[in-house]
Image (cartoon, rainbow, N blue to C red):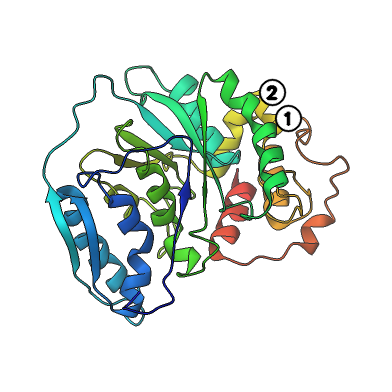
Amino acid sequence: EDGSKNKIEIFYEFDRIVPWSENIHLDGHLFAILLHAMERGKNVRVHGTISQMAMRNVEELQSIWQMWRPKTYKKIEILPDRVDTSRIVKTQEKAIAAFSGGVDSIYTAMRHTRLLPENVRYPLSDALMIHGFDVDIDNISGFKKLVSRVTPILTDLNIKLRTLRTNSRELKLQNWDDSHGLELAACLHMYYDEFAFGLVGSSGPYYNFILPWGSNAVTDRLISGNNLSIIHDGGGSFRTDKVNDIKNYPLACKLLRVCYEDTENSKNCGKCEKCVRTQLAFLAAGAKSIPECFPEGFNLQIIKDVKLYRDGNIKDLKKILEY
Protein backbone atom coordinates (compact mmCIF):
# COMPACT_ATOMS: atom_id res chain seq x y z
CA GLU A 1 0.00 0.00 0.00
CA ASP A 2 2.05 2.92 -1.34
CA GLY A 3 5.10 1.77 0.59
CA SER A 4 3.28 2.19 3.90
CA LYS A 5 4.01 -0.07 6.86
CA ASN A 6 0.26 -0.62 7.29
CA LYS A 7 -0.41 -2.94 4.39
CA ILE A 8 -3.90 -4.03 3.40
CA GLU A 9 -4.52 -7.77 3.13
CA ILE A 10 -7.51 -9.14 1.22
CA PHE A 11 -7.94 -12.87 1.68
CA TYR A 12 -9.92 -15.56 -0.11
CA GLU A 13 -10.46 -18.82 1.77
CA PHE A 14 -11.92 -21.56 -0.37
CA ASP A 15 -12.31 -25.28 -0.78
CA ARG A 16 -8.94 -26.36 -2.14
CA ILE A 17 -5.24 -25.55 -2.12
CA VAL A 18 -3.87 -24.11 -5.36
CA PRO A 19 -0.09 -24.53 -5.67
CA TRP A 20 1.55 -21.17 -6.33
CA SER A 21 3.07 -20.58 -9.74
CA GLU A 22 4.31 -17.45 -11.47
CA ASN A 23 1.89 -18.35 -14.28
CA ILE A 24 -1.27 -18.24 -12.13
CA HIS A 25 -3.57 -15.50 -13.40
CA LEU A 26 -4.24 -12.80 -10.81
CA ASP A 27 -7.12 -11.28 -12.81
CA GLY A 28 -9.59 -11.63 -9.94
CA HIS A 29 -7.30 -9.92 -7.46
CA LEU A 30 -6.88 -7.00 -9.85
CA PHE A 31 -10.63 -6.62 -10.49
CA ALA A 32 -11.28 -6.73 -6.72
CA ILE A 33 -9.31 -3.54 -5.98
CA LEU A 34 -9.62 -1.66 -9.29
CA LEU A 35 -11.97 1.09 -8.08
CA HIS A 36 -9.98 1.54 -4.86
CA ALA A 37 -6.85 2.25 -6.92
CA MET A 38 -8.74 4.49 -9.37
CA GLU A 39 -10.29 6.52 -6.55
CA ARG A 40 -6.83 7.16 -5.12
CA GLY A 41 -5.23 7.68 -8.53
CA LYS A 42 -2.54 5.08 -7.80
CA ASN A 43 -1.07 2.72 -10.38
CA VAL A 44 -1.30 -0.99 -9.60
CA ARG A 45 1.88 -3.08 -9.58
CA VAL A 46 1.04 -6.77 -9.98
CA HIS A 47 3.75 -9.14 -8.76
CA GLY A 48 2.61 -11.92 -11.05
CA THR A 49 0.61 -12.59 -14.20
CA ILE A 50 -2.47 -10.90 -15.66
CA SER A 51 -4.22 -12.33 -18.72
CA GLN A 52 -4.27 -10.34 -21.94
CA MET A 53 -8.08 -10.20 -22.00
CA ALA A 54 -8.20 -8.86 -18.45
CA MET A 55 -5.73 -6.11 -19.37
CA ARG A 56 -7.90 -5.08 -22.32
CA ASN A 57 -11.08 -5.19 -20.25
CA VAL A 58 -9.61 -3.17 -17.37
CA GLU A 59 -8.79 -0.43 -19.88
CA GLU A 60 -12.44 -0.32 -20.97
CA LEU A 61 -13.77 -0.58 -17.42
CA GLN A 62 -11.70 2.43 -16.43
CA SER A 63 -13.16 4.45 -19.31
CA ILE A 64 -16.68 3.55 -18.23
CA TRP A 65 -16.28 4.36 -14.55
CA GLN A 66 -14.42 7.55 -15.34
CA MET A 67 -17.32 8.67 -17.50
CA TRP A 68 -19.93 7.66 -14.94
CA ARG A 69 -18.13 9.24 -11.96
CA PRO A 70 -15.55 11.73 -13.30
CA LYS A 71 -15.07 13.40 -9.92
CA THR A 72 -14.36 10.10 -8.16
CA TYR A 73 -12.27 7.88 -10.41
CA LYS A 74 -8.97 8.64 -12.16
CA LYS A 75 -7.22 6.76 -14.97
CA ILE A 76 -4.37 4.57 -13.72
CA GLU A 77 -1.82 2.15 -15.15
CA ILE A 78 -1.75 -1.60 -14.51
CA LEU A 79 1.83 -2.84 -14.30
CA PRO A 80 2.04 -6.65 -14.16
CA ASP A 81 5.24 -8.70 -14.20
CA ARG A 82 3.80 -10.71 -17.09
CA VAL A 83 0.87 -10.59 -19.50
CA ASP A 84 -0.30 -14.03 -20.63
CA THR A 85 -1.90 -14.47 -24.06
CA SER A 86 -2.49 -18.22 -23.69
CA ARG A 87 -5.76 -19.98 -22.85
CA ILE A 88 -6.32 -23.12 -20.81
CA VAL A 89 -7.61 -25.98 -22.91
CA LYS A 90 -10.50 -27.44 -20.92
CA THR A 91 -11.69 -30.94 -21.80
CA GLN A 92 -15.22 -29.96 -20.76
CA GLU A 93 -16.85 -26.52 -20.70
CA LYS A 94 -18.44 -25.83 -17.32
CA ALA A 95 -20.14 -22.84 -15.71
CA ILE A 96 -20.24 -21.70 -12.10
CA ALA A 97 -22.90 -19.26 -10.85
CA ALA A 98 -22.83 -16.81 -7.97
CA PHE A 99 -25.55 -17.95 -5.55
CA SER A 100 -27.14 -16.23 -2.55
CA GLY A 101 -30.48 -18.02 -2.33
CA GLY A 102 -32.33 -14.90 -3.52
CA VAL A 103 -34.66 -14.35 -6.48
CA ASP A 104 -31.98 -13.48 -9.04
CA SER A 105 -29.63 -16.36 -8.21
CA ILE A 106 -32.37 -18.99 -7.93
CA TYR A 107 -33.80 -17.84 -11.27
CA THR A 108 -30.37 -18.17 -12.92
CA ALA A 109 -29.94 -21.65 -11.43
CA MET A 110 -33.40 -22.69 -12.69
CA ARG A 111 -32.87 -21.05 -16.05
CA HIS A 112 -29.80 -23.10 -16.92
CA THR A 113 -31.04 -26.41 -15.53
CA ARG A 114 -34.79 -26.39 -16.27
CA LEU A 115 -36.24 -23.36 -18.00
CA LEU A 116 -34.11 -22.85 -21.11
CA PRO A 117 -33.80 -25.36 -23.96
CA GLU A 118 -30.68 -27.50 -23.48
CA ASN A 119 -28.96 -26.17 -26.59
CA VAL A 120 -28.90 -22.58 -25.28
CA ARG A 121 -28.18 -23.19 -21.59
CA TYR A 122 -24.78 -22.53 -20.10
CA PRO A 123 -23.34 -25.82 -18.74
CA LEU A 124 -24.07 -24.92 -15.12
CA SER A 125 -22.60 -27.50 -12.75
CA ASP A 126 -21.59 -25.51 -9.66
CA ALA A 127 -22.77 -22.57 -7.54
CA LEU A 128 -20.65 -20.32 -5.33
CA MET A 129 -21.89 -18.90 -2.03
CA ILE A 130 -19.69 -16.14 -0.62
CA HIS A 131 -19.32 -15.60 3.11
CA GLY A 132 -18.54 -11.95 3.73
CA PHE A 133 -20.98 -10.32 1.32
CA ASP A 134 -24.63 -10.80 2.35
CA VAL A 135 -23.61 -12.42 5.64
CA ASP A 136 -21.07 -10.63 7.85
CA ILE A 137 -17.69 -12.33 7.81
CA ASP A 138 -17.69 -12.94 11.58
CA ASN A 139 -21.18 -14.45 11.54
CA ILE A 140 -20.09 -18.07 11.16
CA SER A 141 -23.33 -19.61 12.48
CA GLY A 142 -25.50 -17.34 10.30
CA PHE A 143 -23.66 -18.39 7.15
CA LYS A 144 -23.90 -22.07 8.10
CA LYS A 145 -27.64 -21.66 8.63
CA LEU A 146 -28.04 -19.92 5.28
CA VAL A 147 -26.05 -22.63 3.50
CA SER A 148 -28.13 -25.32 5.21
CA ARG A 149 -31.33 -23.49 4.25
CA VAL A 150 -30.70 -23.13 0.50
CA THR A 151 -28.57 -26.22 -0.25
CA PRO A 152 -31.64 -28.42 -0.93
CA ILE A 153 -32.48 -26.19 -3.92
CA LEU A 154 -29.04 -26.76 -5.45
CA THR A 155 -29.19 -30.48 -4.69
CA ASP A 156 -32.57 -30.73 -6.40
CA LEU A 157 -31.20 -28.91 -9.46
CA ASN A 158 -28.13 -31.17 -9.49
CA ILE A 159 -25.75 -28.27 -8.85
CA LYS A 160 -22.68 -28.68 -6.64
CA LEU A 161 -22.21 -26.10 -3.89
CA ARG A 162 -18.90 -24.27 -3.42
CA THR A 163 -18.26 -21.78 -0.62
CA LEU A 164 -15.71 -19.01 -0.30
CA ARG A 165 -14.92 -16.62 2.56
CA THR A 166 -13.42 -13.18 1.95
CA ASN A 167 -12.92 -9.89 3.76
CA SER A 168 -13.00 -7.77 0.58
CA ARG A 169 -16.32 -6.11 1.48
CA GLU A 170 -15.62 -5.84 5.20
CA LEU A 171 -12.53 -3.68 4.55
CA LYS A 172 -14.74 -1.00 2.96
CA LEU A 173 -12.01 0.10 0.59
CA GLN A 174 -14.58 1.00 -2.05
CA ASN A 175 -18.16 2.19 -2.48
CA TRP A 176 -20.04 -1.13 -2.41
CA ASP A 177 -22.77 0.19 -4.72
CA ASP A 178 -20.06 0.68 -7.37
CA SER A 179 -17.74 -2.22 -6.60
CA HIS A 180 -19.95 -5.22 -5.79
CA GLY A 181 -19.95 -6.56 -9.35
CA LEU A 182 -16.15 -6.42 -9.51
CA GLU A 183 -15.74 -7.95 -6.06
CA LEU A 184 -18.24 -10.72 -6.86
CA ALA A 185 -16.55 -11.54 -10.18
CA ALA A 186 -13.20 -11.59 -8.38
CA CYS A 187 -14.48 -14.50 -6.28
CA LEU A 188 -15.62 -16.39 -9.39
CA HIS A 189 -12.17 -15.84 -10.91
CA MET A 190 -10.65 -17.92 -8.10
CA TYR A 191 -12.00 -20.89 -10.09
CA TYR A 192 -10.83 -19.79 -13.54
CA ASP A 193 -8.78 -22.96 -14.04
CA GLU A 194 -11.90 -25.15 -13.71
CA PHE A 195 -14.68 -23.15 -15.37
CA ALA A 196 -15.15 -21.35 -18.67
CA PHE A 197 -18.11 -19.21 -17.53
CA GLY A 198 -19.09 -17.36 -14.37
CA LEU A 199 -22.80 -16.48 -14.22
CA VAL A 200 -24.03 -13.42 -12.33
CA GLY A 201 -27.80 -13.01 -12.01
CA SER A 202 -29.08 -9.65 -13.22
CA SER A 203 -30.30 -7.28 -10.52
CA GLY A 204 -32.38 -5.29 -13.01
CA PRO A 205 -33.89 -5.79 -16.49
CA TYR A 206 -32.41 -4.41 -19.69
CA TYR A 207 -35.51 -2.23 -19.94
CA ASN A 208 -34.66 0.15 -17.12
CA PHE A 209 -31.49 -0.89 -15.33
CA ILE A 210 -29.92 1.78 -13.13
CA LEU A 211 -26.52 3.29 -13.96
CA PRO A 212 -24.08 3.70 -12.38
CA TRP A 213 -24.50 0.41 -10.51
CA GLY A 214 -21.86 -2.17 -9.63
CA SER A 215 -23.38 -5.14 -11.47
CA ASN A 216 -25.02 -4.35 -14.80
CA ALA A 217 -25.27 -5.43 -18.42
CA VAL A 218 -22.65 -2.90 -19.52
CA THR A 219 -19.72 -3.74 -17.25
CA ASP A 220 -20.26 -7.34 -16.06
CA ARG A 221 -19.09 -8.88 -19.33
CA LEU A 222 -15.88 -6.85 -19.09
CA ILE A 223 -14.90 -8.42 -15.76
CA SER A 224 -13.52 -11.35 -17.76
CA GLY A 225 -10.10 -12.80 -18.49
CA ASN A 226 -8.57 -15.23 -20.98
CA ASN A 227 -10.02 -18.29 -19.27
CA LEU A 228 -13.20 -17.16 -17.49
CA SER A 229 -16.00 -15.16 -19.10
CA ILE A 230 -18.38 -13.38 -16.73
CA ILE A 231 -21.98 -13.64 -17.97
CA HIS A 232 -24.67 -11.13 -16.94
CA ASP A 233 -27.66 -13.44 -16.83
CA GLY A 234 -31.42 -12.93 -16.87
CA GLY A 235 -31.65 -9.25 -17.83
CA GLY A 236 -34.44 -10.05 -20.27
CA SER A 237 -36.82 -10.62 -17.34
CA PHE A 238 -38.33 -8.23 -14.84
CA ARG A 239 -38.10 -9.32 -11.19
CA THR A 240 -41.79 -10.21 -11.19
CA ASP A 241 -41.23 -12.36 -14.30
CA LYS A 242 -38.57 -14.25 -12.35
CA VAL A 243 -40.93 -14.66 -9.40
CA ASN A 244 -43.60 -15.93 -11.82
CA ASP A 245 -41.32 -18.88 -12.66
CA ILE A 246 -40.14 -19.39 -9.07
CA LYS A 247 -43.75 -19.57 -7.78
CA ASN A 248 -44.15 -22.86 -9.68
CA TYR A 249 -41.13 -24.39 -7.88
CA PRO A 250 -42.34 -25.43 -4.38
CA LEU A 251 -38.86 -25.99 -2.95
CA ALA A 252 -37.79 -22.45 -3.86
CA CYS A 253 -41.02 -21.03 -2.43
CA LYS A 254 -40.15 -22.77 0.83
CA LEU A 255 -36.45 -21.82 1.04
CA LEU A 256 -36.02 -18.52 -0.86
CA ARG A 257 -34.15 -15.90 1.17
CA VAL A 258 -34.11 -12.22 0.18
CA CYS A 259 -33.90 -10.32 3.48
CA TYR A 260 -31.07 -8.04 4.59
CA GLU A 261 -32.68 -7.05 7.92
CA ASP A 262 -32.77 -10.45 9.64
CA THR A 263 -30.18 -10.39 12.43
CA GLU A 264 -29.13 -14.00 11.81
CA ASN A 265 -28.66 -13.35 8.07
CA SER A 266 -30.43 -16.63 7.32
CA LYS A 267 -34.20 -15.93 7.31
CA ASN A 268 -36.75 -13.43 5.97
CA CYS A 269 -38.17 -10.86 8.40
CA GLY A 270 -41.22 -10.33 6.18
CA LYS A 271 -41.42 -6.58 6.90
CA CYS A 272 -38.37 -4.90 5.35
CA GLU A 273 -38.56 -3.21 1.95
CA LYS A 274 -37.13 -6.17 0.05
CA CYS A 275 -39.31 -8.72 1.85
CA VAL A 276 -42.45 -6.68 1.20
CA ARG A 277 -41.53 -6.02 -2.42
CA THR A 278 -40.88 -9.74 -3.03
CA GLN A 279 -44.16 -10.80 -1.39
CA LEU A 280 -46.05 -8.29 -3.53
CA ALA A 281 -44.30 -9.69 -6.61
CA PHE A 282 -45.59 -13.18 -5.75
CA LEU A 283 -49.14 -11.86 -5.39
CA ALA A 284 -48.85 -9.89 -8.63
CA ALA A 285 -47.61 -13.02 -10.40
CA GLY A 286 -50.74 -14.87 -9.35
CA ALA A 287 -49.55 -16.82 -6.32
CA LYS A 288 -52.55 -17.99 -4.31
CA SER A 289 -50.84 -17.08 -1.05
CA ILE A 290 -47.60 -15.66 0.33
CA PRO A 291 -44.95 -18.41 0.02
CA GLU A 292 -43.91 -20.16 3.22
CA CYS A 293 -40.37 -18.74 3.12
CA PHE A 294 -41.91 -15.59 4.67
CA PRO A 295 -43.50 -15.35 8.15
CA GLU A 296 -47.26 -15.77 8.21
CA GLY A 297 -49.57 -12.82 8.57
CA PHE A 298 -48.75 -10.48 5.70
CA ASN A 299 -50.80 -7.31 6.12
CA LEU A 300 -51.26 -4.71 3.40
CA GLN A 301 -50.71 -2.04 6.07
CA ILE A 302 -47.02 -3.02 6.03
CA ILE A 303 -46.69 -1.33 2.62
CA LYS A 304 -47.20 2.08 4.21
CA ASP A 305 -44.27 1.51 6.57
CA VAL A 306 -41.77 0.62 3.83
CA LYS A 307 -38.88 3.03 3.30
CA LEU A 308 -37.45 3.26 -0.21
CA TYR A 309 -33.72 3.93 -0.59
CA ARG A 310 -33.12 3.68 -4.33
CA ASP A 311 -34.81 4.68 -7.57
CA GLY A 312 -34.59 1.05 -8.66
CA ASN A 313 -36.88 0.00 -5.79
CA ILE A 314 -39.50 2.51 -6.94
CA LYS A 315 -39.29 1.19 -10.50
CA ASP A 316 -39.69 -2.38 -9.21
CA LEU A 317 -42.83 -1.42 -7.28
CA LYS A 318 -44.31 0.35 -10.31
CA LYS A 319 -43.65 -2.76 -12.39
CA ILE A 320 -45.35 -4.93 -9.77
CA LEU A 321 -48.38 -2.61 -9.94
CA GLU A 322 -48.46 -2.85 -13.75
CA TYR A 323 -48.06 -6.63 -13.59
Residue 215 visible in the snapshot:
no
Q: Do the residues labelled 2 and 1 touch (CB within 8 Å)?
A: yes
Q: Residue at x 34, y 55 (%)?
A: 29
In the displayed structure, 244 sits above or below 308; it is above
Residue 6 lies left or right of residue 40; in this view the side is right
Residue farthest along the bottom direction in this orientation: 71
Could you say where residue 49 lies in the image, as x and y percent from the top left?
20, 51
Q: Name the residue under label 1.
A: 254
The one nearer the camera, 186 or 212, is: 186
Could you say where residue 56 lies in the image, as x and y percent from the top left?
16, 55
Q: Residue at x 33, y 72 (%)?
A: 37
Three-letter residue code for mark 1: Lys
Quadrant in which the N terminus appears: bottom left
Element class at badge 1: helix
In the displayed structure, 132 sits above or below 17; it is below
In the displayed structure, 107 sits above or below 22; it is above
Q: Residue at x 46, y 28 (%)?
A: 126
User: Tag on residue 287?
Assistant: none
Label 2 crowd bin: few (<14), some (14–19), many (20+), radius 10 Å: few
- What separation in Å lies between label 2 and label 1 (alpha carbons)? 6 Å
Three-letter residue code for mark 2: Pro
The one nearer the camera, 143 or 313, is: 143
Residue farthest along the left direction in this orientation: 85
Task: Count the numbered circles shown.
Answer: 2
Could you say where residue 304 lies in the image, as x and y percent from the top left?
79, 62
Residue 305: image quadrant is bottom right
In the displayed structure, 1 sits above or below 144; it is below
Residue 272 visible in the snapshot:
yes
Q: Mark 2 points at which residue?
A: 250
The one nearer the camera, 300 or 188, is: 188
Residue 219: image quadrant is bottom left
